[in-house]
Amino acid sequence: MWTYEKRLQYPVNITQPNAKLAQFIMSQYGGPDGEIGASMRYLSQRFTMPNRMAMAVLNDVGTEELAHISYQ
C-alpha cells in the first residue's frame, strides 16, 4: 500500500541536543495523544463494528496512523 524510502527531504545537522524538544517529540509518538495511541484505538474499535464498511475504514485509518511512525 505504501512505499517507504529512508531519505530526508532536507539535510539535518544537529549542533547541540535539546532534551525538552526530544521529550515533546517522543510524547507525540507514544504519549496518550500520540500516533501509537491513536492507531491502537482505531484498530481495536474495528473489531466491535457491526458494519463491514465502517470496519474497513477504521482498519485503513489505523494503518495510516501506524505509517506515520518511522523508527531510525
Image (tube, rainbow, N blue to C red):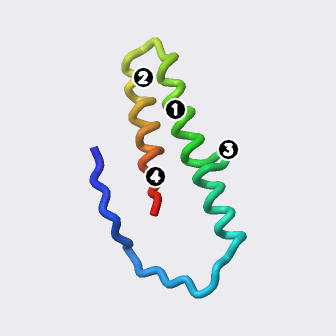
Task: Measure the alpha-carbon separation of dots 2 and 4.
Answer: 20 Å
Three-letter amino acid code at disc 1?
Tyr
Crowd class of label 1 (few under 14; some 14 to 19; many from 20; radius 10 Å):
some
The residue carrying mark 1 is: 42
Q: Earlier in the sequence, mark 4 or mark 3?
A: 3
Q: Residue furthest bottom?
A: 15
- Residue in the picture at 48% in, 17% down: 49
Q: Residue furthest right?
A: 20
Mark seen at residue 68: 4
Task: Measure the alpha-carbon separation of dots 3 and 2.
Answer: 23 Å
Crowd class of label 4 (few under 14; some 14 to 19; many from 20; radius 10 Å):
few
Task: Measure the alpha-carbon separation of dots 4 and 1.
Answer: 14 Å
Mark seen at residue 32: 3
Q: Earlier in the sequence, mark 3 or mark 1?
A: 3
- Residue in the picture at 46% in, 12% down: 50
Label 4 secondary element:
loop
Q: Position of residue 1 (x, y in %)?
A: 27, 43
Three-letter amino acid code at disc 3?
Pro
Q: Position of residue 12 (x, y in %)?
A: 47, 80
Callout 3 touching callout 1 (CB < 8 Å): no
Label 1 secondary element:
helix
Q: Position of residue 17 (x, y in %)?
A: 64, 79
